Image (cartoon, coloured by chain):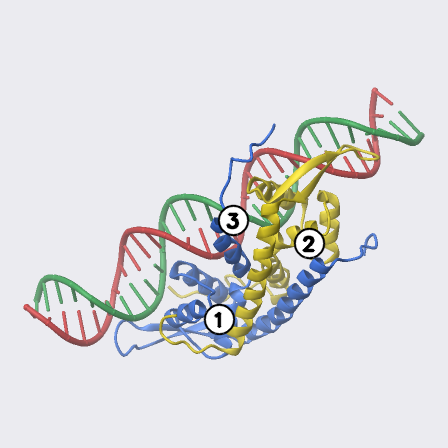
Chain colours: A blue, B yellow, C red, D green
Amino acid sequence: MEINSNINNTDLDLNAENIKAQMRKGVLEYCILSILRKGDSYVSPLIAELKAAKMIVVEGTLYPLLTRQKNQGLLSYRWEESPSGPPRKYYSLTEKGKKALEFMDDAWKDVIKTVELIKTGIEINEEE
Amino acid sequence: MEINSNINNTDLDLNAENIKAQMRKGVLEYCILSILRKGDSYVSPLIAELKAAKMIVVEGTLYPLLTRQKNQGLLSYRWEESPSGPPRKYYSLTEKGKKALEFMDDAWKDVIKTVELIKTGIEINEEE
DNA sequence: CCCACTACCTTGCAATACAAAGTACTGATA
DNA sequence: TATCAGTACTTTGTATTGCAAGGTAGTGGG
């Protein structure tokens, strides 16, 4: 079956944001943990910091993500009174979270190296 | 509702592959296009090269991805006889694909910079 | 004629990011 | 005390997409 090239003629511009978004996705968890490494925090400042770094995220993404990381034992949380408004849920890295973060530091370096390798070309010697 | 920390007590080791996998996902499309920049290819060698770079991917991932990129106009393909076996579908970058790739080069640099920024800390000055 | 090999393609599932809407506490205002 | 604005946490529905597994099909050797 032939496929007409006009099935999905989205412009490059339309893809642009999507491309960046995709790349960011893979490192979102890493970024969250990295921010918390610098100090406990709750969602609003987390979003602010990610936004400031152009790693744009919204609440609906962050809350489930934090819950996942907490369920994995990477984070713990405590409630703190707010000077105004409802209490805040402060997250902090657990020991396991710190280890995971160290692992991610390496994984991230690896990915960067891998991409570089692919861009420049690899010699393939049959199987490994 | 309290959450028992044993709901999801997967070891860090179990997450390890998952963490790397997540990070790789975001750059998969970029890698595909980067490989094709060096010369046309078809699925088997593509998988071999990605595997060699530890960017492990399987057929079921690659075929739909190539089809998506083709439908977006980033790739075109042609059939070529094989010295043995069924014909091969060679993909090559289109002009649009080349432009997208250049864009991705920048996007990738941006993401690396962003992650570095987040790790070291950013000053937030209100809005942008 | 069958089998091994190569190669392409599809289906169903699971994970997850996002948009949007919902819940709820605080403090100011009327 | 009712209401509203602001802050903050949470959930629901949808779309994307990677993967495991299975399916189709051409070529050449026994």
Disc 3: CA contacts within 10 A as few (<14), some (14-19) or many (>=20)? some
Q: Nearer the viewer, mark 3 or mark 2?
A: 3
Q: Chain of mark 2?
A: B
The secondary structure type at the circle numbered 1 is: strand
User: Is B38 drawn above or below residue A51 in the view shown?
Assistant: above
* Residue at x 71%, y 43% (from the top left corner): B43
* Residue at x 62%, y 70% (from the top left corner): A103
Judge by depth and name the residue closer to the eye, B124 or A80. B124
Work out whether mark 1 precedes mark 3 in sequence or the reverse, and give the earlier one: 3
CB of mark 1 within 8 Å of CB of mark 2?
A: no
Q: Chain of mark 1?
A: A
* Residue at x 57%, y 61% (from the top left corner): B106
Q: Position of residue A106 (x, y in %)?
A: 65, 70
> Picture quarter containing residue B22?
bottom right
Residue type (three-letter) at the residue carrying disc 3? Leu
Disc number placed over residue B56 in the picture, else none? 2
Q: Which residue is mark 3?
A: A12
Q: Are marks 1 and 2 on the same chain?
A: no
Q: Chain of mark 3?
A: A
The secondary structure type at the circle numbered 3 is: helix
Q: Are marks 3 and 2 on the same chain?
A: no
Disc 1: CA contacts within 10 A as few (<14), some (14-19) or many (>=20)? many
User: Is D4 drawn above or below residue A80 in the view shown?
Assistant: above
> Picture quarter containing residue B42?
top right
Judge by depth and name the residue closer to the eye, A36 or A48. A48
Q: Position of residue B65 (x, y in %)?
A: 60, 45
Rounded to the nearest whole Å, what is the CA distance between mark 3 and mark 2? Answer: 27 Å
Tell me if D26 is positioned left or right of A21 in this view. Answer: right
Residue type (three-letter) at the residue carrying disc 2? Ile
Q: Position of residue B76 (x, y in %)?
A: 64, 40
Q: Which residue is mark 1?
A: A75
| Count of numbered marks | 3
